[in-house]
Image (tube, grey):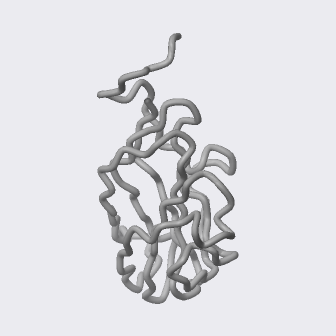
Amino acid sequence: MPANTDPIYSRLGDVSKDGTTGMGQLITAAANDYTGIGANNVLVWTSDATNGGFLQRVRLKAGGTNVASVMRFFINNGSTNGTATNNCFYGEIGLPATTASATGATVDLDYPFNIALPAGFRIYAGLGTAVAAGWAMTPVAGKY
């Protein structure tokens, strides 16, 4: 298939968390930073290496009982996220305290991005405070 040199629509839908560690991995450890360099920030999504991609949103789901926290999102230029100048703080969403239940659902939260990202750019995220059960993140995106 030839490269999509003038993307308007995604050529391939993508809902997998970072493409390497599987879908829906729970994060529990706090990164608590505003630069994206924290060791506990996790890779959420990577745009297509050749043509880039479009990230519509990231859905967050509690994995059980958690204290209230915040999830912070960073755009990374494709280089190491350990260097602050490679990252841009994008935004954050408050995460409520949650309680595991066999009869009721925990809240689903969507953080909207609606941005096109250049080739190889990445999204990282980190918790403000540690939680017990963790939060799963699912990107809803497309690769050009």
Nearest to the observer: residue 28 or residue 45: 45
At x 57%, y 43%, the residue is 120
Q: What is the quadrant of residue 68 in the picture?
A: bottom left
Q: Is residue 106 above or below residue 20?
A: below
What is the total number of numbered labels drawn onto the structure image?
Answer: 0
Q: Is residue 62 left or right of residue 8?
A: right
Where does the C terminus fall, quadrant-wise? top left
Q: Is residue 20 above or below residue 67?
A: above
Q: Is residue 19 above or below residue 132?
A: above
- Image location (x, y in percent) of residue 100: 47, 77
Q: Position of residue 23 (x, y in %)?
A: 58, 49
Instruction: Please identify the residue farthest to the front as the structure is shown.
Output: 85
Q: Residue furthest top?
A: 1
**Which residue is found at the position 52% from the left and 63% from the top?**
136
**Residue nearest the viewer, comparing 8 with 129:** 8
Residue at image point 62% right, 43% down: 19
The residue that appears at 35% across and 53% down in the rendered structure is 57
Task: Give the quadrant of residue 26.
Answer: bottom right
